[in-house]
Image: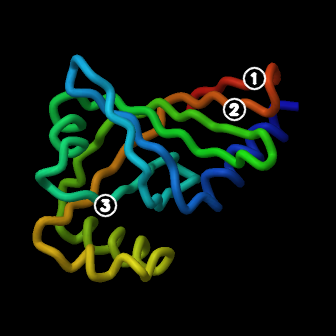
Amino acid sequence: MSKNKMQLIDDLVSNADFCVLATTNGIEPLCSLMTLFADHASMKFYFLTNKDSQKSKNIKQHPHASILIDRREENIALTVQGVYSPIKTQQTTKAIMKLFLHKHPELKDFVDQDSTELIRIVGKRGKLLTGIDDIFETKF
């Protein structure tokens, strides 16, 4: 049973183009619809944002975040709790940006702006809901 649930989580993460990223400033939550690139094997999630955006400020001050990926038409939702993990080298950032653009070429102009940054969230725990009361929780 859990093997099938883990496969469903892998499928959701691998095929998602969009998600909701929830951050906080320590007092108020902020939810943002985001274009997503994910490394499903390591449960690392990548997002592009403006360096001056509220979500960027939030995530750097309060590194815990939540990600929602869903298939509403199938009544399936995955919530991932994770932690912001800064990317340390420019070489890694460039490599991930290249993969991001391969999946989302429509974002090339945004990527090319100096004010754009790449944010990485490392998934720690997941909660998969299939239907109203079928809940599967796991650690990554």
Contact flag, marks 1 and 2 (Cβ < 8 Å): yes
Image point 42% across, 54% down: which residue? 34
The answer for how far apart the CA atoms under marks 1 and 3 are is 30 Å
Give x and y (percent) for residue 55.
Answer: 25, 42
Q: Nearer the viewer, residue 33 or 123?
A: 33
Q: Residue 6: x, y in percent?
A: 74, 40
Identity of the amino acid at label 2? Leu
The answer to whether residue 10 is above or below residue 16 is above
Q: Which residue is mark 2?
A: 128
The image shows residue 127, relative to residue 59, as above or below, that is: above
Residue that carries the numbered disc 3 in the rendered image: 48
Q: Provide the secondary structure element on which disc 3 rests.
A: strand
Farthest residue, direction right:
1
Neighbor class of circle 2 (other Cα within 10 Å; few <14, some 14-19, many 20+) is many
Number of marks in picture? 3
Crowd rating for badge 3 (residues with CA inside 10 Å; few <14, some 14–19, many 20+): many
**Quadrant assignment for the N terminus:** top right
State the CA–CA distance, disc 1 to disc 2.
6 Å
Please provide percent x and percent y for residue 132.
Answer: 79, 24
Q: CA distance from mark 2 to mark 3?
A: 25 Å
Q: Amino acid at mark 3?
A: Leu
Label disc, if present, on residue 135 of the rendered structure:
1
Dot placed on the residue nearer the N-terminal end, 1 or 2: 2
Give the colour scheme shown: rainbow
Looking at the image, which residue is at 19% across and 54% down? 88
